Image (spheres, rainbow, N blue to C red):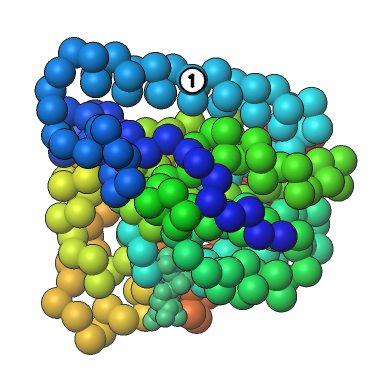
Amino acid sequence: MLLEGINGKRVCHHKEGHDHPHPHPGDGPLETHTRGARQIKVVRRVLDANDIMAANNRKLFAAHHIFVLNLMSSPGSGKTTTLEKTLAHLMSDFRCAVIVGDICTTQDADRLATSGAPVVQINTDEFGGDCHLAAHVIEKALGGLDLNAIDILIVENIGNLVCPAEFDIGEDKRAVVLSVTEGEDKPLKYPLMFRECDAALLNKIDLLPYLDYDAKLAVANIHQIHPGMPVFETSAKTEAGFAPWLEWLRTSAREKIK
Ligand SMILES: Nc1nc2c(ncn2[C@@H]2O[C@H](COP(=O)(O)OP(=O)(O)O)[C@@H](O)[C@H]2O)c(=O)[nH]1
Ligand SMILES: [Mg+2]
């Protein structure tokens, strides 16, 4: 199922990285970066409205005993590949479904549908390409799923290391994928994402022999931002390191749906 052009909120008030509301393409009257009190008020209302919708979603998920994972990362770090492999393991034990957000195309939905799980693709291009999935967008997408037939719902958020971390969608857990080709410094540069998540995957470790990459430093940087957060060193290509990741996911899901 494809939901196109859901008119989500196109104004993010970045807690970090910017000290002002950050309009996005197509915002019309809010196109300029102004610090006006009125604009900040509008943005506050947007985030408050999102929190209300997220709480509604959370109630709905609880009523149906659905565990929800919000999977986030920069574009290309391996969310879809990780999900393809993860679903292949989970489908025998859990009834899984996926909501996948992209600005354009249904390519990820097509890839994920081969798992046999129901998949809803959200495209946000018509309205300037929202950079995150907001709670009301998830609520709309749920209309395409049978909530009585789902144990685990995984949301692949839009590729972006900033905005998605600011929008609660009613999920139980959040995980971030950081690939080894992105640099060890990204947790320090984009701290909100790493602070807000419950687990991190350090993906593409199969490439380590070819890179000057210090995986220990990357993990230390993640822990500097979020002490004690589980970090799974994985390769979605070879499935190296997948067992502890799958165990974390299974345990988290069972806590919710028992
Ligand atoms: N070598 C390697 N490539 C990977 C791995 N995970 C993903 N990729 C590749 O990275 C690219 C982006 O992956 P994709 O899953 O689409 O990333 P997404 O944009 O985060 O969903 C694709 O070409 C994948 O085949 C991995 O663990 N190792
Ligand atoms: Mg993807």
Amino acid type indicated by mark 1? Ala
Disc 1: CA contacts within 10 A as few (<14), some (14-19) or many (>=20): some
| Element at label 1 | helix
Tell me which image quadrant ligand 1 sits in: bottom left
Q: Position of residue 205 (x, y in %)?
A: 35, 74
10 sits left or right of 224 in the view? right
Residue at 16% x, 36% y: name it: 32
**Residue on which the image places disc 1:** 49
Q: Position of residue 152 (x, y in %)?
A: 71, 47
Q: Nearer the viewer, residue 12 or 182?
A: 12
Residue 54 visible, this angle: yes
Residue at 33% x, 19% y: name it: 42
Quarter that holds the N terminus = bottom right
Q: Is residue 3 above or below residue 251?
A: below
Q: Is residue 253 above or below residue 50?
A: below
Residue at 44% x, 49% y: name it: 127
| Residue at the extreme bottom | 210
Q: Position of residue 104 (x, y in %)?
A: 47, 65
